[in-house]
Image: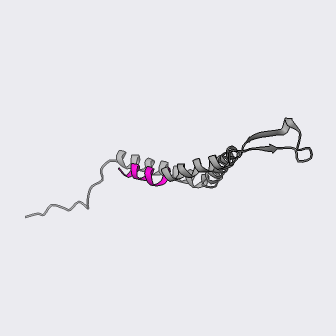
Amino acid sequence: MFNRLILIVVFVPLAIILIALAVANREPVAFTLDPFNPGNPALTLTLPLFIFLFLALAIGMIVGSLATSIKQGRYRKLARQRGAEAENLRQAVSRAPAAPRGPALPKPTN
């Protein structure tokens, strides 16, 4: 039920906004990689503007995800190491013989 609510509240308005953006920006634009000769057809790509916008958004998300992953890599490595150490300690405790609970008391003599 909660997942359906999130779907309706977040993704439906986002989809409406993206569709409106695509409809409003459907005119073809030229994207050239040669700043000195912009008319060079080998290095010019002509597509609707919304495709370039969506590509920029996707590339930004990928680059941001990679940067976050690289930045947090040391913390994940440390967590893996500590998890392995904890598991080794659990196994060592389960293999150890049971120790007596307290000091052994001498039997009283009557």
Residue visible at 35% across and 50% down in the picture: 1
* Rendering coords of residue 20 (x, y %): 59, 50
Task: Tell me where residue 103 sits by quadrant.
Answer: bottom left
Residue visible at 30% across and 50% down in the picture: 98
Counting every numbered tag in the picture gives 0
* Rendering coords of residue 57 (x, y %): 65, 50
User: Who is closer to the viewer here, 34 or 92?
Assistant: 34
Q: Is the C terminus in the top left, top right, bottom left or bottom right quadrant?
A: bottom left
- Outermost residue toward the right in this view: 36
* Rendering coords of residue 59 (x, y %): 67, 47
The segment highlighted magenta reads 1-11
Residue visible at 51% across and 53% down in the picture: 13
Secondary structure mostly taken by the magenta-highlighted segment of the chain: helix
Left or right, 79 with respect to 29, comes to: left
- Outermost residue toward the left in this view: 110
Left or right, 21 with respect to 7, comes to: right
Left or right, 73 with respect to 48, comes to: left
* Rendering coords of residue 36 (x, y %): 92, 47
The scheme the figure's colours follow is one colour
Magenta region includes residue 22: no
Magenta region includes residue 8: yes
User: Who is closer to the viewer here, 67 or 100?
Assistant: 67
Left or right, 66 with respect to 80, comes to: right
